[in-house]
Image (cartoon, grey):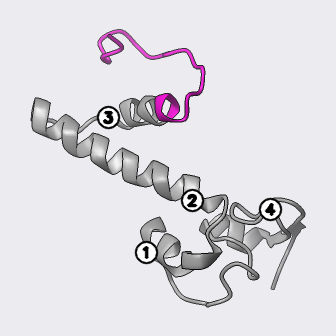
């Protein structure tokens, strides 16, 4: 049962999408009609194939983040904190932001 529909909110085509699909991180039914359980966004990106529009940026950002985490582990031997990954995503998207975090978190 759909509780709410949102206009211009599909992360792929910008069309109408239900609250359930938004909550699940899926594009609208026009973009991806299959009712399959997706364990991660990579599967959604593969399922969209030729219908990939704005979701392409999300797929690219996920790949970029995975590459950054691997690089960070290779160079430091540690996994980056969620906050550090968020900062990296903002840099990759060329977003202006202020690094706000407690002392000792690694803002250098």
Work out whether mark 4 precedes mark 3 in sequence or the reverse, and give the earlier one. Answer: 4
Work out whether mark 3 precedes mark 2 in sequence or the reverse, and give the earlier one. Answer: 2
Picture residue at 38% right of the left edge, 53% below the top: 63
Picture residue at 45% right of the left edge, 75% below the top: 43
Work out whether mark 1 precedes mark 2 in sequence or the reverse, and give the earlier one. Answer: 1
Disc 2 secondary structure class: helix
Residue behind mark 4: 14
Q: Residues within 10 Å of mark 1 (few under 14, many from 20)?
A: few
Residue behind mark 3: 81
Distance CA(mark 1)–CA(mark 2): 18 Å
Residue behind mark 1: 39
Work out whether mark 4 precedes mark 2 in sequence or the reverse, and give the earlier one. Answer: 4
Work out whether mark 3 precedes mark 1 in sequence or the reverse, and give the earlier one. Answer: 1
Looking at the rendering, the stretch of residues picked out in magenta corresponds to 90-108
The answer to whether marks 1 and 2 mark residues whose Cβ atoms lie closer than 8 Å is no
Front position among marks 1 and 2: 2
Disc 4 secondary structure class: loop
User: With respect to residue 21, does 106 lie above or below?
Assistant: above
Distance CA(mark 4)–CA(mark 3): 32 Å
Residue 101 magenta-highlighted? yes
Residue behind mark 2: 56
């Amino acid at each position: 049962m759909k509780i709410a529909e949102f206009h211009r909110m599909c992360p792929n085509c910008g069309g109408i999408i239900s609250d359930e699909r938004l909550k699940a991180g899926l594009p609208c039914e026009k973009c991806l009609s299959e009712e399959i359980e997706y364990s991660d966004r990579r599967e959604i990106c593969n399922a969209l194939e030729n219908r990939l529009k704005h979701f392409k940026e999300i797929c690219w950002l996920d790949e970029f983040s995975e590459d950054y985490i691997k690089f960070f582990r290779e160079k430091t031997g540690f996994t980056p904190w969620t906050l550090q990954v968020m900062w990296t995503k903002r840099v990759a998207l060329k977003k202006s932001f202020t690094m706000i975090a407690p002392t000792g978190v690694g803002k250098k």
